[in-house]
Amino acid sequence: MLPRIDHVIEKAKAYNPSSDSKLLQKAYLFSAYAHEGQLRLSGEPYLVHPLAVTDILADLKADDIALVAGLLHDVVEDNHQVSLAEIEKRFGAEVAHIVDGVTKIEEKVPLQNRQEDEWATLRKLVLAMVDDIRVILVKLADRLHNLRTMQAMPEHRRPVKALETLEIYAPIAYRLGMGKMKIELEDLGFRYAWPEEYERLQAALQEKRAYSQDFIEETTAELYKMLKQTGISGDVSGRTKHLYSIWLKLRRQGIGVEQVYDYMAFRLLVESVQDCYAVLGGIHSLWKPIPGRFKDFIALPKENHYRSLHTSVVGIHGQPFELQIRTHQMHQEAENGIAAHWQYKEGRLSKEDETATTQWLRQLTEWKQEGGTPGEFIQNLRVDLFPKDVYVFTPKGRVLSFPRGATPIDFAYAIHTDVGHHCVGAKVNGKLIPLKTPLKSGDRVDIVTSPSGKPSRDWLKAAVTGRALSKIKAWLNVQEKTRAIELGKAALERELRRLKVNLKEAEEEGLLAKALKSVSLPDVDSLWAEIGYGKLSARLFARKLAPREEEAPVLTKAAGPPGASEPALEVRGASDLLTTLAKCCRPIRGDEIIGFISRGRGLMVHRADCPNVARLGYNSDRIMQVNWGSGGPATTHDVSLDIQVEDKPGIVAAITQAVADAKAPLRAIEGNVDGRGEGSVRLTIAIRDKTHLNAILAQFAKMPGILEVHRRNR
Ligand code: MN
């Protein structure tokens, strides 16, 4: 629902009885006049925006000056008919000053990169804030509303604004103790900076949410019961943690969403500090606290003045969750931070309201007065805004930030991947230091590289940034894989030589593909790597490629043995080729056959329906037409048959009898019974030709008890 000026006026009256409704009304009308005819990207009248910003300011319980500035914050920028002087004349110097400050923050000076751009924005923001804290309040409210309505902005422009929000505005809101603002800025910033990851996390949490709802209700009831028993009055609320904080945790710990357990948090608001500790005792006697997770920010407030007790426990059904315990007053301050201390005069906080935050602002003022370079100012500021980071300089004076504990290795990879891969040392403030020395804020770092330098495994212990770690790991993996492939290739070749197997031929016959499939590997490279890593035995694999029985050409040169007048095989176009019957399909005389020229091995004769022929078929210039010759020696072929039978006495004897009657010598026989009345018999017999085989098959077909017969390929 769109805010209306009377609602904002009412809201202001409620927390500030001396609020000047007429002044607000006047500012609203002036804003309406200045923005007349302008539309937002969403197509709404532009006036909606300053009104919404002012509504957010009223939620922060801002004073009239800030509310008026909120209504007018875009007037000068968007309507060049309106000058600052006019605003000053109509609404006073303070309002004009704030509007000027807010406008100037947006002005961009051309800079080299986004990071410098951001730091320039940050500096302007903080300098303006030091002059009048209300500048930043208006700016934060402005940014929040722009993000809330970002859907209307073209997609390609969203990430820049969103990242700037995450890197500048949310940390400032946090530093000013405005927890609620910070969380909303972060979730919206996350959503538009990394939309896909946002969606994915959102969906992944959806499942957990359904469970969470019941859990939150149950636990809330338990907590109220505990409050009643301890005789303390308080409010309990439960929620799932905000998406951005969960996402940061996933990234920090390199885990998947299914490994996040403490994604729920509860808050207990009570009357007094004593109550906080009493309630903490009640909770710890109800559920087991997780060691190391209790934090007393009441006795030791955070640098942004945040006060609360934090603990994590293992709750109902073993589900861990976090609890924050604080007084209503502390909560008010934690939600709105500096905006909760509304006793400041003329935008400066009063002496009586001395907090860590006001001290910080005072300190910023001093830095500003002391002068110094913008770089130094920003460095100080960033140390303050991001206390867990270190800020160091490149030789050219660029500032780079790293998590605490970062070393020159991280620095080198931040400059360029190649600088990282080849770094051999580092000069910090002119002195050579070991690569594993942690950097300190203010260090000037110069990386020494050498063409022969390369990453080593123990760098993984020295680096802390994700970028350096992933680059080092990737480099090591490539190195190791290359090495493994070399080793694996040598090992396999050794085994193949021993078994007298030619890899090329095994490939042409399809044996290699089959063997690779049997160990679920896609190609020879990964086979070598697998052997090299020691995950697969070269000997076992080589055996898969070796022929089962002694290698012997079943047939023949095209010329038959002495005495035979006709050749066993006729090969069209090349009569003196060495021909061999392929072992993959074992053709027998009478089968439809096809010839395939194989390197160094003459002509391989396959059955026309052999799967390997189909596989090799695209290479049609290597295929030759062949026919069975009319002559040839009285050779036999071993043929294997799989016979499905009924499990009844005498069946195997009947089969062997039939084979003997057909004069097909039995080479091997093996039987199995499945226990459900059926069995299978595998039979290898010596067959003269296809006619011979067909006769036997016909015989089997007539026999009672035989269900199915298949000719096997090998
Ligand atoms: Mn605006």
Image (spheres, helix red, strand yellow):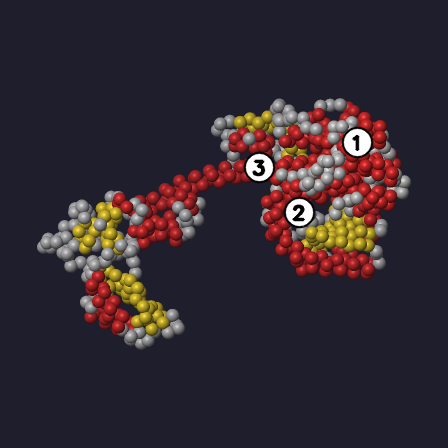
Residue labelled 2 has its Cβ within 8 Å of some atom of ligand 1: no
Horizontally, is 485 left or right of 332 in the view?
Answer: left
Nearer the N terminus, badge 3 or badge 2? 2
Q: Residue 293 or 395: which is nearer the viewer? A: 395
> Which residue sits at x=20%, y=70%?
661
Q: Is residue 658 above or below residue 617?
A: below
The residue singled out by tag 2 in the image is: 243
The residue singled out by tag 1 in the image is: 98
Q: CA distance from mark 3 to mark 1?
A: 41 Å
CB within 8 Å, label 3 to label 2: no
Tag 1's secondary structure?
helix
Q: Amino acid at mark 3?
A: Arg
Q: Amino acid at mark 2?
A: Leu
Tag 3's secondary structure?
helix
Residue 483 location in percent, x, y?
43, 39
Residue 451 location in percent, x, y?
49, 27
The residue singled out by tag 3 in the image is: 467
> Which residue sits at x=75%, y=38%?
47
Residue 30 location in percent, x, y?
81, 34
Q: Residue 268 or 342: which is nearer the viewer? A: 342
Residue 113 location in percent, x, y?
62, 29
Q: Quadrant of the C terminus?
A: bottom left
Nearer the N terminus, badge 3 or badge 1? 1
Tag 2's secondary structure?
helix
